[in-house]
């Protein structure tokens, strides 16, 4: 499954790294690309292991706002 997650408060290059790690640490994530300018995270994942809600929760646990 491929999804695009909009992140409202991604401002610095450090945010990009934190977000990439938060997403990548979920089992079942196959690919993750973070675009700071668009404030989007493109993620490819296996729904057998992880859901979109799980990915959103990982970002919200790190203090980010998902739009």
Image: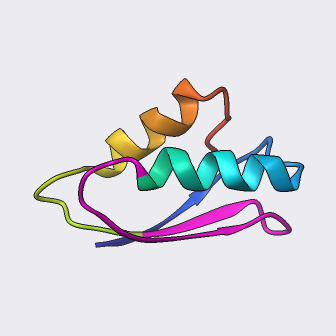
Q: Is residue 13 left or right of residue 49?
A: right
Q: Residue furthest left?
A: 48
Q: Residue at x 26, y 50 (%)?
A: 51
Residue 5 image offset from top left, x and y in percent: 55, 57
Residue 29 image offset from top left, x and y in percent: 33, 62
Q: Is residue 5 above or below residue 15?
A: below
Q: Residue at x 67, y 34 (%)?
A: 64
Q: Is residue 60 left or right of residue 40?
A: left
Q: Residue at x 46, y 36 (%)?
A: 58
Q: Is residue 33 above or below residue 21?
A: below
Front one among 40 and 25: 25
Q: How is the image coloured?
A: rainbow
Q: Is residue 31 above or below residue 59?
A: below
Q: Is residue 48 left or right of residue 40?
A: left
Tally the marks: 0
Residue 33 on the magenta segment: yes
Q: Quadrant of the C terminus?
A: top right
Residue 40 on the magenta segment: yes
Q: Residue at x 86, y 68 (%)?
A: 37
Range drawn in magenta: 25-43
Q: Quadrant of the N terminus?
A: bottom left
Residue 41 image offset from top left, x and y in percent: 60, 63
Q: Is residue 47 left or right of residue 63?
A: left
Residue 13 image offset from top left, x and y in percent: 85, 56
């Amino acid at each position: 499954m491929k999804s695009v997650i909009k992140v409202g408060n991604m401002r610095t290059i450090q945010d990009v790294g934190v977000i990439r790690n938060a997403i990548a640490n979920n089992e079942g994530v196959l690919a993750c690309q973070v675009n700071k300018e668009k404030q989007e995270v493109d993620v490819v994942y296996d729904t057998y292991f992880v859901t979109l809600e799980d990915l959103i929760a990982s970002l919200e646990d790190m203090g980010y706002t998902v739009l």
